[in-house]
């Protein structure tokens, strides 16, 4: 049965809508980014995010339908992100999706954003004709808000997820953003650090691999005693970068860079390079390498201990070029297939929400019109 599902995503700083056919064909994909709104503040301002979503939601959905050559009436279901995310931002997408579902008398499907990131990979693999994924899948969801490892399996049409790892403190994308902000590089930091890293020497600054020593930092009841688990931790590396900046008296150069970049509406790679000295480029490259090595080595160690048959890497940080290269290299050495979404579907989008909704559509797992946004929703 062919089903056209409209996905709506508004959990953070992207207003997105997309039409996906039966979880396997991306028909349209519209993303309105709020980078320009939040950039002057060096991070997402929740109140501004809600306001921008309100402005963008109607035109973005209209555009997604027009691109898909679909009408409101021809859709089979409406899917929307329930959480996790910013509560005010989520509510914009949810209220709009509810109103559409009610007015059109179409099924409404609530989707977990993290499940969406995993289904971005599945959607694109199916679209390429790959229907033979090997289970269990170990999925690393690595974004601005999350660094989570899940064992994913499929029972009948529905998916199940077991959490086997997570960050104890900052998410990996958060570390990229905070380090970029610290070095006067603006927001969001991940893409800038990604583009600048090849110009520095990653061997110059040594960062200690984050070690978790205190088992008692686990939240009560979260892990079974004796259960294997993987811990990530990225707040230490951010502090190490700060210390390096202080010890090497880099603050004045950073302030000058920040001021110079604020005057440029859309800085190019050349603009950044003109404002960066070798020491800072080496620091950036060293930071990125430490992040990448930690993510790759822990994920592949987990794949081994859980006997995973394939690895997914998804979420905003999965757009990182060095991360993709290192994962491909190391996974090949381990004899494991590794899958990423295209870079466009790595960061937040609504195609992943419409794709994750399809198994729920088949199972008639619909949401009541009074379901709530959940800022801290877990998978
Ligand atoms: O998945 P996403 O769009 O939103 C969340 O769900 O958080 O991820 C955004 C995060 C930001 O922290 C951003 O800096 C990071 O992903 N990011 C990157 C790259 N592109 C986006 N990090 C490293 N390299 C990139 N190329
Ligand atoms: Zn995300």
Image: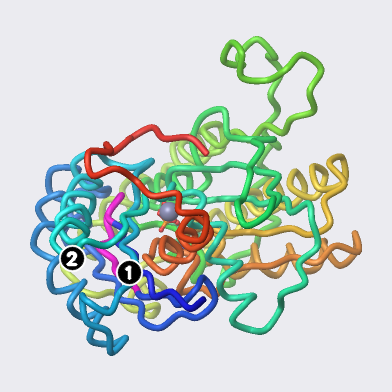
Front-lying residue, 5 or 378: 5
In this picture, residue 95 sits left or right of residue 118: left
Front-lying residue, 27 or 335: 27
Considering only order in the chain, which callout, 2 or 1, is on the residue closer to the N terminus? 1
As helix, strand or loop, the secondary structure at mark 2 comes to helix
Q: Is residue 207 visible?
A: yes
Q: Which residue is mark 2?
A: 104
In this picture, residue 171 sits left or right of residue 293: left
In this picture, residue 343 sits left or right of residue 375: right
Q: Is residue 279 visible?
A: no
Within 10 Å of disc 1 (Cα), the crowding (few <14, some 14-19, many 20+) is many
Bounds of the magenta segment: 10-18
Which residue appears at 22% of the width and 76% of the height? Answer: 73
Q: Which residue is mark 1?
A: 6
Which residue appears at 20% of the width and 45% of the height? Answer: 91
Q: Position of residue 93 (x, y in %)?
A: 22, 54
Say if mark 1 contacts mark 2, CB within 8 Å. no
């Amino acid at each position: 049965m062919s089903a056209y599902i409209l996905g709506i995503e508004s959990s953070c700083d992207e207003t997105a809508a997309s039409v996906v056919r039966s979880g396997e064909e991306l028909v349209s994909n519209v993303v309105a980014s709020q980078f320009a709104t939040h950039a002057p503040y060096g991070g997402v301002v929740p109140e501004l995010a809600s306001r921008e979503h309100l402005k963008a939601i109607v035109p973005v959905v209209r555009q997604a339908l027009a691109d898909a050559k679909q009408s409101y009436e021809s859709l089979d279901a409406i899917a929307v992100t329930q959480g996790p995310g910013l509560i005010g931002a989520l509510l914009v997408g949810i209220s709009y999706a509810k109103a559409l579902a009610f007015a059109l008398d179409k099924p409404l499907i609530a989707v977990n954003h993290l499940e969406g990131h995993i289904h971005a990979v599945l959607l694109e693999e199916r679209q390429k004709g790959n229907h033979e994924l090997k289970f269990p899948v170990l999925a690393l969801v690595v974004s601005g808000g999350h660094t989570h490892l899940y064992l994913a399996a499929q029972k009948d049409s529905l998916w199940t997820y077991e959490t086997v790892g997570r960050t104890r403190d900052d998410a990996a994308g958060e570390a990229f953003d905070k380090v970029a902000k610290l070095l006067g590089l603006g927001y969001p930091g991940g893409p800038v650090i990604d583009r600048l890293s090849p110009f520095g020497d990653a061997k110059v600054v040594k960062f200690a691999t984050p070690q978790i020593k205190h088992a008692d930092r686990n939240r009560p009841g979260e892990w079974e005693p004796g259960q294997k688990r993987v811990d990530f931790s990225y707040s230490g590396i951010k502090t190490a970068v700060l210390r390096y900046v202080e010890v090497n008296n880099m603050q004045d150069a950073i302030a000058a860079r920040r001021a110079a970049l604020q005057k440029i509406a859309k800085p190019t790679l050349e603009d950044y390079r003109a404002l960066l000295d070798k020491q800072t480029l080496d620091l950036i490259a060293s930071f990125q390498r430490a992040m990448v090595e930690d993510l790759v080595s822990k994920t592949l160690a987990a794949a081994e201990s859980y006997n995973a048959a394939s690895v997914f890497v998804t979420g905003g940080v999965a757009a990182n070029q060095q991360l993709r290269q290192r994962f491909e290299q190391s996974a090949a050495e381990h004899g494991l297939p590794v899958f990423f979404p295209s870079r466009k579907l790595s960061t937040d989008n609504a195609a992943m929400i419409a794709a994750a909704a399809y198994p729920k559509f088949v199972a008639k797992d619909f949401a009541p019109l009074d379901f709530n946004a959940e800022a801290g929703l877990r998978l």
